[in-house]
Structures are given as structure tokens and as C-alpha cells.
Amino acid sequence: MKKILYRASALLVAAGLMTSCLDEALEVESRSSFDAANVFSTYQLAEYAVIGIGEIYAHTNSYNARLNHMYGYNTDIELKMGSKISGAKLEEYTLSEYDTQINNSSLNTDNNGYNEIMIGVERANLAIAGLREHANLSDPNMAYLLGEALTYRALYYEELIKMWGDVPLHLTPLTSEDLYAPKTDRDDIYVAILADLEEAIGYLYWPFEASQTQRADRMNKAFAKGLYARIALMASGYAWRPDPGTVGTGNFGSLRLTTNPALSKAALYPKALKHLEDVIASGTLQLDPSYEHLWRSFNDFSHMTSHEVMFVQPFGNARGRWNYAHAYPHTANSPFIKDKSGKGGQTGVNPTLWWKYEKQDVRRDLSCVFMRWSQDANDKTGGWELRNATSCYFGKYRYEWMIDYPGGTGDGCKPIVMRYADVYLMAAEMAAYLSAADGGGLDKAKDYLGEVRRRAYAGNTDMVDTFLASLTLGSAVGNDDAAISDYQAEGTIMKAIIDERAKEFVGEFLRKQDLIRWGLLKLKLDEASDDMKSLARMTGDYAGYKAYSELKDIKDKSGKNVIYTAETYYVYWREKGQGIEIFGLEADQIGKTPADYVSEEDNGGWDRLDFISDAIFCPVSSDKLTADTFADEMNFRWKYFYSNSYNDPYPRSVWPLFGQNLSNSQGTLVNDYGYDNL
């Protein structure tokens, strides 16, 4: 009984870190009453316990300061800024460049993300067991709490598989007998958590149906159905897996699909598509009519009651470091960060993505910004300034759009786990795979794709209609390899979905899993590498800039000797509102000057900046530059989308169990995928 009392109390204390309401409960509940029967038969106490499941997000080495900005890049659209050849932050660059080691100092701790998520699983198991045994589940509110706990468990295991692959499966509270369990084949985990969601869906309220689901930091039926679909896509897709029957034996593995027929696309997609269509038919959600308003609401936290946002990581208003890592940079003394040190800019956009959008797509200039807020070193004034082509950042995340930002590293931003646009695009992908007889088909896929695309082309929806009319099924129907077959096939529905997910979700870090499950991780990273090189050297799709380039001398650290002469394309820019205006990038502006730019003296407020050259894409520090630097292609950024001894990101697309995890496992845990073991 003592252990049960402690566990129940711990759940309530964890919930108290997220809500001050616990103080009131502690005043009226004596310590002796914190037994499982009392906690899980009393709605308010049971609710505290279930809310406490999500408290692990706020732990420093969990999502707060580690997982939210150490997983999810590099992809073809999202990058860690710089690369390992810069010589700094090596441990972080090995993570992003698919070369993680088991002793990585950022993650090899006894309270690392793996352990923290497992704590969340244990809290979910305690709540599930307590509610099943002691709650009156005929009460819809108590049943809702059970659904919430089941959904948390499914979400946590989805995250564990995403980052670590095969892990131990625990579906009941830990005992001394199963504390040190070996890995479970992820297929068995998928089966278990899909069953969790099927049960949870029956208990949960729709968004805005009840008081519990008025905000996006509580689970709801729409999110559980969407999570079912997301897991179905993962389970039925490609992944780097140990050979069948060898999980936890040190097997190197290979890129393959599941061998479990219950997890095939043919088996899962009809169920998952039905869940997504239930969400659409429910009418409880809708796309925010304005893409810009959606992201303004993210930064001022009003997205918590948005009808597009389905679930967020439940951070308090001074916890979490999302904008700290992902917002475009502000240097010291920016009035928007209230700090003497700079913030933002640790990650950013692969700059070539800007050119993948059409000019009429409103997402382009909201998602991809080549700027920072900077203080002038001489007169101490500050403002927005243009950066070069390597410095492309997420314009969705902006300190100036925040309200009552407290300063410091904790910004309170609540990362979006899922939003309604994803429901449409997942449904489009599944409908394209299924024939009309199975509830899918091209017309349905086009309709779902069109819902997202029409918002992006506000005022130009005729372009969307023309685009959709041109799409064909390609090889989508019933083909596990449709993405591999069609990712470069213009006019196919699968390529359209692949491209749309990039443009819609850049900076939301869904892309890595998308590329993995499609079997496209290496193919798209290699494509992106070649594309960045073309941009830097102004060839291929970017050749139009080269005709108007100028030669710029790069000098050594003495400033006297020219070591390289780079063909350079210049653009014009000026501050405009809370941002900048750029002239010279659009196809009809190449080689031209702004109409009000007459001369350097009579310049209409425009400055001129060297924006594109291969020298810009060389992240070697300026004091180490030599003539040989530019002769070696390994000194250029496009070589570091991934960089490991396998020349392949896939064997390192999942992290190892780190040294601390292995040493604390009593020998039951073994790294697969060619990682070291203790």
C-alpha cells in the first residue's frame, strides 16, 4: 500500500507543476487520503493525476530544452544552421547530421528524453490502471479521463519509436519483475497503441464539446483519430528496422516495411481514412482562414482555442524554449527579447525552399525569412536587416508577435503537435492509395489537398483549380512505393502531396518522419544537397542570377591577400514595418534596380547586399580561410545534410540508447543499427 500511496501522490504533485488548482485540493485532502482508490474515484483528484502525465514535457532534458530542438532536422526543408565543419557545437551537429554517438553529451544523461518519456508512460499506466479499477466509467467525465490517459500513452510510444525505434513496451504499472525489460518489436507496440486509441476515441469529447476540450492542451476525440492516422502512416511505411526476429540483439538492420499484415497500408488505411473523415464530418474544426493569423496566434498563445489546432505540448507560459531555438534571430538588446544576449536562429529553412513556392503562395514569405533584428554597433540603434541566402529562418516564429514574453530562455510557446491541415493532407495521401471501391480515389484526394492549398493561394484560387485539374493518380493506387516512384514525377498526386506537406509544415518538424516512412530520406537529402549547390553556384533553376552576378574578392584573415574570387549576385533591401523588403529575387526583378533607387546617395532607403555565391555557403570561420578551403567541396554546406561513415542517413535515422540508458538497464538493453554497446 505504501508504494501505491507514493505513486498516487507523485502523480498529483506532477499535475501541480502545471496547475495551481492542486493547492486548493491539498488544503482539503489529507495526506492519508492519497491512496489509489480515493484518487481515481474522485473526479478532481483523478483529473490532476491525468494532467500530470503531460508534465514531463516541461523537464529540461525532455522536450523543454532538448527534444524540441534536437530532433526533426536535417531534412530537405529544415536545417540546423551551420554544420560540423564550423568547429563549434559538434555534439549538436552530429545529431542533426545523422552521426549520433552513444556518449552524446546533450542526451547521455540519467534524465534524458528517453527516460523522461518512459516516466510519462508510467504515469499513464498508473492512471489507466487506477481508473479502470476505481472509477465509475459510466460517468462520461471519468471515461474521458481514461481516454486522455490512453491517448497520452499512445502519443508517448509514437514519440519513442520515432526517436529510438524498438523500445520496451509497458502496458501496466512497473513492478520489480518487469522493471528491466528488453526491447519489444515496434510492430507489437504499434498494435498495442492503435488499440489504445480505438478504445480512447469512444471516451473522448470532441473539440469544444465539453469544458475539458475548450483548449488544445487537453486531449480530444479529433486528435486521437488524427493520431491513429499518423501512427498508421508510420507503422505501414518504411523505417530502418532490425531483421525480423532480431530486435535487441545488436542486428544492424535494413530499410524495410513491416512484415505484419495487420500493419500494412491495405489493412490500416481504410480504418485511418474513416477516422480522418469522421473528424472532417464532425464540423468541430476548421482551417484558420488566414495563414498569417494562425502563426500570430501561435506566438501570442491564442492558438490554444483555435479551431485548427488539435493538440499542443502543454507548457506553462514561462516554460519551453521553442522560439529561443527556432525563431528568426534577435541580437542582444532587441526590445522584443528583453535580454542582453541574442536568441533564435539555431535552426532554419533550407533556403532553396523559398524558390519552391509560387509568388502567389502566401506561405512563402511567412515561412522563409532572410532577416534578423540587429543592433547597430556604433550608434546602438537597432532594426531589421537582410542576411544572405544561407541565413533563411522560420518566419512563423517571431518574438515581436509575442505578448507579455517574460524574457529569459523560457518563452512559454506551446508547440503544435497536430493541426487540422494535417488531417486533410493525411486523408489525401490515404485516399490516393485506396481505390474508389475502398473509399478512396483521385477526386477525393484532390478535394482534401485543395482544402489546404486554397488557403495558401488566397485571392488566387483559380490557380489551385487549374493545378488540381492537372493531377493524375500516377502510381499511387495500392503501391507501397508510390512516393519513391513519383517524388520527381510532375503532375502526380503523390508528388503534389509530398511537396504540399513541405510547404505547409516547414518548421513544424513533421518532415523527417514523412521522408523516413516514404522511403525518401536519402533520396530527398541528396536532391536537396544538389539543389543547394545549384543555388550557391547559380546553375540549373538558378542560372538566371548568374548573368547578373559580379566578382567579389575573398581575403585571408590579414585582409590583404585575395584567396578566392566568387561570382556573387547582389540584391537590394530596406526595412519595412516589422521586417524587410527585398528587391532582386523575384524572376521579373533579376538584374534590375528598384524604381526609386537612383544612386547610392539618392537610394530610396535601399541598401545593397551580396546575397548568393558559393563563398557564402562555406561555413569555415573567416580566420581559417585559405585558398585550399574553396578547392575542397567538403568545406561547403551542401555536403552536410548528413555526414557519417555509412554515406547514408537511414542507419542513423533513429538514435541509440545512450550510455546512461544501457548502464542502468542491468544488461537487458542492447543497441541495434550498428551503434556501440557498453
Image (cartoon, rainbow, N blue to C red):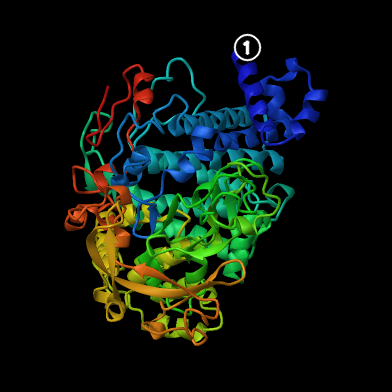
Q: Residues within 10 Å of mark 1 (few under 14, many from 20)?
A: few
Q: Quadrant of the C terminus?
A: top left
Position of the N terminus, as image quadrant, is top right
Residue 206 shows up from this direction = yes
Q: Is 656 on the left-hand or right-hand side of 304?
A: left
Q: Is residue 479 visible?
A: no
Residue 12 place in picture, x, y as percent: 67, 27
The secondary element bearing badge 1 is classed as helix
Q: Nearer the viewer, residue 364 or 330?
A: 330
Disc 1 target residue: 2
Q: Position of residue 423 (x, y in %)?
A: 50, 61
Rendering coords of residue 212 (x, y %): 70, 47
Q: Is residue 49 above or below residue 269?
A: above
Seen at 22% across and 35% down, the residue is: 674
* Quarter of the image where one finds residue 383: bottom right
* Residue at 53% from the left image edge and 55% from the top image edge: 377
Amino acid type, mark 1: Lys
